[in-house]
Image (cartoon, grey):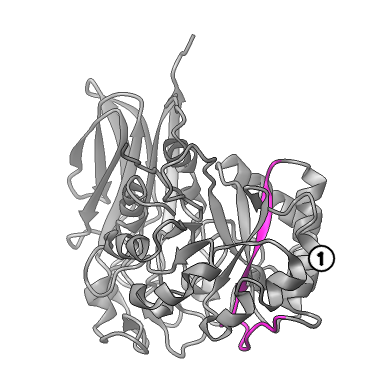
Amino acid sequence: MICTWPLVVTLVLFLHCTAAQKYVFAHVVVGNTAAHTQSTWEDDITLAQNAGINAFALNCGYPDSNIPTQVANAFAAAEALGSSFKLFFSFDYLGGGETWPATGSPSVVSYLNQYVSTSAYFNYEGIPFVSTFEGTGNIADWAQGGTIRSAVGDLYFVPDWTSLGPSGISSYLDNIEGFFSWDMWPVGATNETDSSDLAWQAATPGKTYMMGVSPWFFHSSDGNPDWVWRGDDLWADRWAQTLAVNSEIVTWNDFGESHYIGPIRDSSEIPSGSAIYVEGSPHDSWRDFLPYYIAMYKGNSFDITSDQMQYWYHTAPTAGGSTCGVYGNDPDYQAEISPNDIVEDGIFFSALLTSDAVVTVQIGSSPAVSYSGLAGINHWSQPFNGHTGSPVFSIIRNGVVVSDATGTPITASTTLSNGCTNYNAWVGSFQGPGLNLP
């Protein structure tokens, strides 16, 4: 029997060929929720659930005085809604500046013991699910019969220890129930493939595997250092790759790395230095096709009742501003190249069509470019080719425009007050009229 697994952004896919329930998770940086109230969490949960997401992975750094209040707000919100939407912890061993202590207060054990028995905590196969971001110096804390499990009980532990590499994980397979890979962005001027995911699957036989799916990456939060990895077609490409590999969405709200798909709630929640690149660059439309992608991943039917398009691009050519010290690739670990060699000057767009149609894209007064679309999901890209102006996206059948929309303008040079190139994406979408279904 051959397993194929359609996957989702921030979600869990299982590499076992079983009839097990499949889930989709979204990674939430709790440190970026300081202005949230319980009501804000309820709104976020509702948006995520409407998109087909099953749970939030609560990324918590240490120490962070924001964590106790916002974790409490998140669980209160999920419990108040009384829905099937769940939460679980992803303990971040790097993001807060210090590693998580196993015991004490606060600690991994204190948070797990406080929340794993609540109705809102996510369980897999009846066991509390928990993850990490790195933490390879604290692997012994998670060992079978070790400090954490002895104090908490059974755990379904699916860490991200990507820095070990596939060859380094073999010594720890007895202490994990699954593995989450943070390898989800390409290195250099290339597009991402699923080769690293397949390598991780081969290195963790018999284990659950979570593959990260992310739409973009531009680190802009602190300048020490800032870098960009290629996004471009990534959102569409990774969804296609999840059909063969399992996955998690990264992220709901990491504004400092530009891969958020949730709403920008409050400017105070954007990390220092990132606001100029984030404000005016909404990513909400990246959620629009998630119900379709998630249905495919779960093996459920999905009726396309109206035409939809989503599109994303940076709003000026990369050469239209200064690089302002931004690197291409992470200079701490990878060969440095110009960021302008990594990011493509183009529009990236997908269409979910009720039936075959022609899709056109016209940038400003330049000639429209036509693409032949088939019923279902389609994806293309179109270079700027020096054109500026507002892109117009149209869906045409039998020579008639059945729906269209206009995106934010593409300018010849950066519009940022600091003169820097904005390597973040602007994302838009539209939905056409529905079919007259019986």
Q: Residue at x 80, y 49 (%)?
A: 79
Looking at the picture, how far across and down is residue 87, in whole percent? 68, 56
Segment colored magenta = 84-102
Res 346 visible: yes
Q: Can residue 420 be seen by looking at this rendering?
A: no
For the residue pair 431 and 46, the one nearer the viewer reads as: 46
Residue 35 sits above or below residue 286 on the image: below
Q: Quadrant of residue 234?
A: bottom left
Q: Quadrant of the N terminus?
A: top left
Per the image, the residue denoted by label 1 is 114
Vertically, is 353 above or below 410? above
Percent x, y of residue 312: 37, 54
Quick one: SS at disc 1? helix
Q: Residue at x 46, y 88 (%)?
A: 223
Q: Is residue 118 magenta?
A: no
Q: Which SS type dominates the magenta stretch?
A: loop
Task: Give the side of residue 158 with respect to residue 8, left or right.
Answer: right
- Looking at the image, which is closer to me, 166 or 334? 166
Query: Left or right: where does residue 423 sit relative to residue 41?
Result: left
Answer left or right for 399 relative to 258.
left
| Residue 100 within the segment the image draws in magenta | yes
Q: How crowded is the residue under tag 1: few (<14 C-alpha within 10 Å), some, or many (20+)? A: few
